[in-house]
Amino acid sequence: MTDEVRHRVENEWFARHEEELLRQARRRHEQRLKELAAQQVAGEKRTLRDLHHMKCPKCGHDMAAKHIDGVEVDRCGTCDGLFFDKGEFEEILLKRSEDRRGFFRKLVGL
């Protein structure tokens, strides 16, 4: 094998391997960008939750959880607004009618 042929074969080998290394580096870079974007979204969701958790959707003041007959109701201390989490209102509606009346009486303090 002549020097020129050996040199050409070496150049081809390096070019092929360099392409593969570049592809791998691009894949790692794209994966890292996806991970960073997911972390950013998670951080934004956490920040929004921290800002809004247990805050009244009507007036923005703090709400307190109140347990009545096994159902947790969030009540605003300022405007007396009520907030039911998913499934809580349905749980109340499934109670017997006298239990429902008792629940709502307890809720309004009668």
Image (spheres, rainbow, N blue to C red):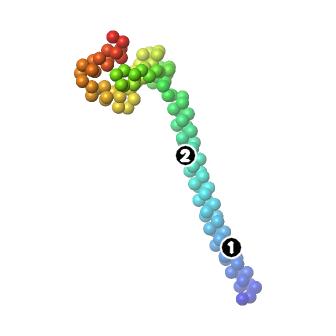
Quadrant of the rendered image containing residue 43? top right
Which x, y percent locates residue 66? Answer: 42, 20
Determine the residue positioned at 27% across, 25% down.
95
Which quarter of the rendering shows the C terminus? top left
Please provide percent x and percent y for residue 32: 60, 52
The image position of residue 67, as x and y in percent, is 40, 22
Query: Where 80 sits versus 87, above or below?
Result: above
**Residue in the image at 49% along x and 24% along y:** 55
Indicate the amino acid at tag 1.
Phe
Report the side of 35 relative to 4 (left or right).
left
Q: In this view, does 38 lie above or below 54?
A: below
Circle 2 packing at 10 Å, graded few (<14), some (14-19), many (20+), is few
Residue lying at the far bottom of the rendered structure = 1
Question: Where is mark 2, residue-wise?
Answer: 38
Q: Which is nearer the N-term, disc 2 or disc 1?
A: 1
Viewer-side residue, 8 vs 29: 29
Provide the residue designation for mark 1.
14
Neighbourhood count class around disc 1 (C-alpha, 10 Å): few under 14, some 14–19, many 20 upward? few
Q: Which label is found at residue 44?
A: none
Q: Nearer the viewer, residue 106 or 84?
A: 106
Instruction: Examine the rendering and report whether any part of residue 29 can be seen.
Output: yes
Residue 17, image quadrant: bottom right
> Could you tell me if residue 58 is visible in this image?
no
C-alpha span from label 2 to label 1: 36 Å
**Residue 8 horizontal/vertical position (percent):** 70, 80
Q: Residue at x 62, y 68 (%)?
A: 20
Q: Determine whether the residue tagged by mark 2 lies in a helix, strand or loop.
A: helix
Three-letter amino acid code at disc 2?
Answer: Ala
Q: How many numbered badges does the structure rendering display?
A: 2
- Extreme-right residue of the structure: 3
> Callout 1: helix, strand or loop?
helix
